Image (cartoon, rainbow, N blue to C red):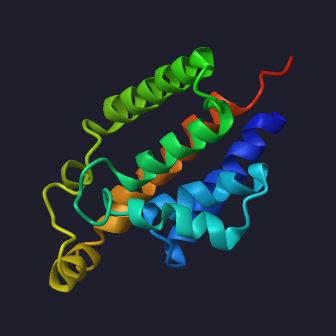
Amino acid sequence: MTRRNSDQTIAEDQAVTNFANGMNCAQAVFSVFAPQFDIEPELALRLSAAMGGGIGRKQEVCGAFNAGSMVLGLHFGNTSTSDKEAKEKTSVLAQLFLERMEHRFGGITCSHLLGGASLRTAADRDFVKSENLSELKCVPCIRESVKVLTELTMPKTQED
């Protein structure tokens, strides 16, 4: 196993553990990458808190995928309005990331991924939990997000 694959697997496992320990899907993904940018754990959680459940549980674009876009912005985003090249690269990579997620899961919205199950009320969330949908649907999205983000952001080596 190359260093890249080992790091990737560790990151995937950490994100899944984060989710199992109570982070939302966006926090689980974002918090794995935040240390690379010296972002304190508490700040990472706050920055990604509203993205879970497809942004505030509105079930739009999956929170793990939203966090992925945030990670790509941290890695490649423009730091000035005149840096059109970085802005373009970030958009292209975000599109690629989302297209890969859509291809893998058949859609990118939380609602689609959960088969139409709602997250809006406590009763809805209890239903999702009772049907084990977080484990069956969310965990694969979290794991795949980290995998693809690692592939897109880690420098290639001779071993790869």
Observer-nearest residue: 56 or 151? 56
Q: In this view, does 58 lie above or below 160?
A: below
Counting labels gives: 0
Residue 109 in the image: state x and y as whole percent.
25, 47
Report x, y in % for residue 21.
Answer: 54, 78
Where residue 90 appears, as percent x and y from the top left, is 54, 26
Residue drawn at the location 86% of the way across and 17% of the way down: 158
Q: In which quarter of the image is residue 150?
A: top right
| The one of 71 and 43 positioned closer to us in this rendering | 43
Q: Residue furthest right?
A: 158
Residue at figure coordinates x 16%, y 84% from the top left: 123
Q: Quadrant of residue 77?
A: top right
Is residue 1 visible in this depiction of the protein? Answer: no
Instruction: Indicate the quadrant where residue 84 lies.
Output: top right
Q: In this view, does 115 lie to the left or right of 82?
A: left
Left or right, 15 with respect to 24, comes to right
Closer-to-camera residue (110/144): 110
Q: Where is residue 27 in the image (x, y as percent from the top left)?
A: 52, 63
61 over 98 or under it: above or below: below
Residue appearing at x 39%, y 32% in the figure: 98
Q: In which quarter of the image is the N terminus?
A: top right
Q: Quick check: 100 left or right of 103?
A: right
Residue 57 seen anywhere in this rendered image of the structure: yes
User: Going 15% across and 64% down the picture, which residue do you hit?
Assistant: 117
Question: In what quadrant of the picture does the C terminus appear?
Answer: top right
